Image (spheres, rainbow, N blue to C red):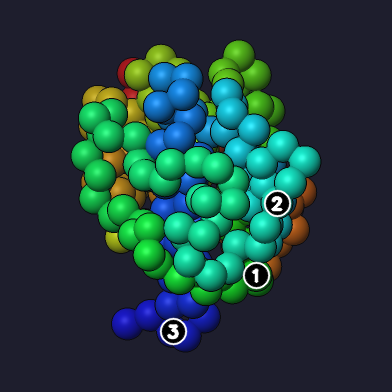
Amino acid sequence: MQDDSTAVYVSTRRQLRGIAETLIAGPQYRAAGTIKLAVRADGFTGVAVPLRVHGDQFVWGPNGVALAGPVSDIAAAAGVQPGPPEGVYEITDPLPVDAVLDIDRTSADLLYRSLYAGGFALGRVLPGGHPVLWPEHFDVAVTADEVNFGVSAGDDYHALPYAYVGPWTPRTGDFWNAPFGAVHPLDTTLDMDGLAASIADFFHRGQEELTRGR
């Protein structure tokens, strides 16, 4: 059973993932043919359209509105047609356009901090990669040599943010503690620098385990 703080985080996470999918990735895909997003220290952004989440604001160009109230009102203010990127992946948890947002700022800050730290750690450990925030699973990730390295904002497997190493070919051993590879739950009390260091250490350990298993 989730405690109250985890339940609040999960609610906020689902809403922010829905915003990423419905108000950024969907409109961007229809305009530019890509669903790729990028992490920022205080939110996330489209890579081909000027749509982004900035703290507690939804921003387009120089303008913005609060991430509050009906999704349809935010879409109308931004001048975008809301909706996920149909036909790219299976839409499993769409954000209804008539949903009324109720985002907890503390939970949002944790999510932003975790994803941004993940992007920073990926750049440190895999400097040749280009971290992408994928709206489907709401994780920032890089794939190298048939291994997925990333940080998830959380999901049905693990409610809170976690780092993962996911080799395409299953591995065995104590390190590989998840059905899809290895997971490292993040210490939510750490600041961005502490999180980035912890995530980078985990990725390095994953690389060592992958080399050992060859």
- Pointer 3 residue: 3
The structure residue drawn at horizontal position 64% and vertical position 33%, both measured from the top left corner, is 50
Please state the total of marks drawn on the protein image: 3
Left or right: where 21 falls relative to 110? left
Question: Is disc 1 in contact with disc 2, using a CB cutoff of under 8 Å?
Answer: no
**Cα gap from disc 2 to disc 3, whole angstroms:** 33 Å
Q: Which of 126 and 171 is in front in this view?
A: 126
Q: Residue 64 carries which label?
A: 2
Q: Name the residue under label 1.
A: 105
Picture layout, residue 155 above or below residue 198: below
- In contact (CB < 8 Å): disc 2 and disc 3: no
Q: Which residue is drawn at 47% across and 85% down?
A: 4
Identify the image quadrant of the C terminus: top left
In this view, the mark in front (2 or 3): 2
The residue under the point 65% across, 27% down is 123
Element assignment for label 2? strand
Q: Residue furthest bottom?
A: 4
Nearest the eye: 12 or 188: 12
Q: Where is residue 143 in the image (x, y as percent from the top left)?
A: 44, 23
Q: Residue at x 45, y 71 (%)?
A: 100
Question: How crowded is the residue under tag 2: few (<14 C-alpha within 10 Å), some, or many (20+)?
Answer: some
Q: Mark 3 or mark 1, which is nearer the start of the sequence? A: 3
Q: Which of marks 1 and 2 is in front?
A: 2
- Describe residue 105's horizontal placement relative to residue 168 as left or right: right
Residue 105 seen from this side: yes
Three-letter amino acid code of the residue under disc 1: Arg
Q: What residue type is labelled 2?
A: Gly
Cα separation, mark 1 vs mark 3, equals 18 Å
* Residue 46 drawn at (x, y percent): 57, 33
Res 121 → quadrant: top right
